[in-house]
Image (cartoon, grey):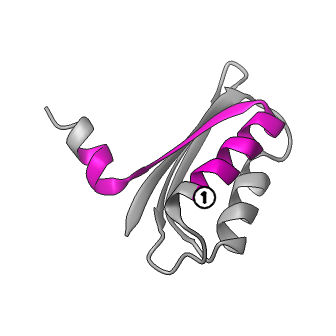
Amino acid sequence: MRAVLTVIGTDRVGIIAGVSNILANSNINILDISQTIMQGIFTMIMVIDASNMSIGFHELGEILDGKGQELGVSIRIQREEIFNSMHRI
C-alpha cells in the first residue's frame, strides 16, 4: 500500500529527521520526497510504501500527529487511492 504524507508549518530544525525516523522505525520506505521552504513556511510531500509497515495505519497517523504537535507542524497521511480520488478533476 502506498500513501501520501504532507507536512506544513513554520520551518525549524528536525522536521525531516523526526518524520523520517518514525517511518524508518515502522518499516516504511520513502519512495519520493519533495520539500521546500517558502518565506519561512516548511512544506513537504512524501510518497511512501507502507506495504510492510510494522504498525497499523491508524496508529501511524496518531504517532505522526503527536510528532507534528511536538514540532509545531501539521502532518497528514492518506492512502494513495483516497488522495487520488479526492484530487481528481
- 36 or 56: which is nearer to us? 56
The spot of residue 86 in percent (x, y) is 25, 37
Q: Residue furthest left?
A: 89
Q: Up-down: is 9 above or below 15? A: above
The spot of residue 21 in percent (x, y) is 75, 64
Q: Residue furthest right?
A: 13
Residue kind at label 1, given as amino acid type: Glu
In magenta stretch: residue 70: yes
With 66 as the anchor, is 12 left or right in this view?
Answer: right
Q: Quadrant of the N terminus?
A: bottom left
Residue depicted at 60% across the width and 77% down the height: 54
Q: Up-down: is 74 above or below 40? A: below
Residue denoted by label 1: 59
Helix, strand or loop under label 1: helix
With 15 as the anchor, is 7 left or right in this view?
Answer: left
- Residue range in magenta is 59-84
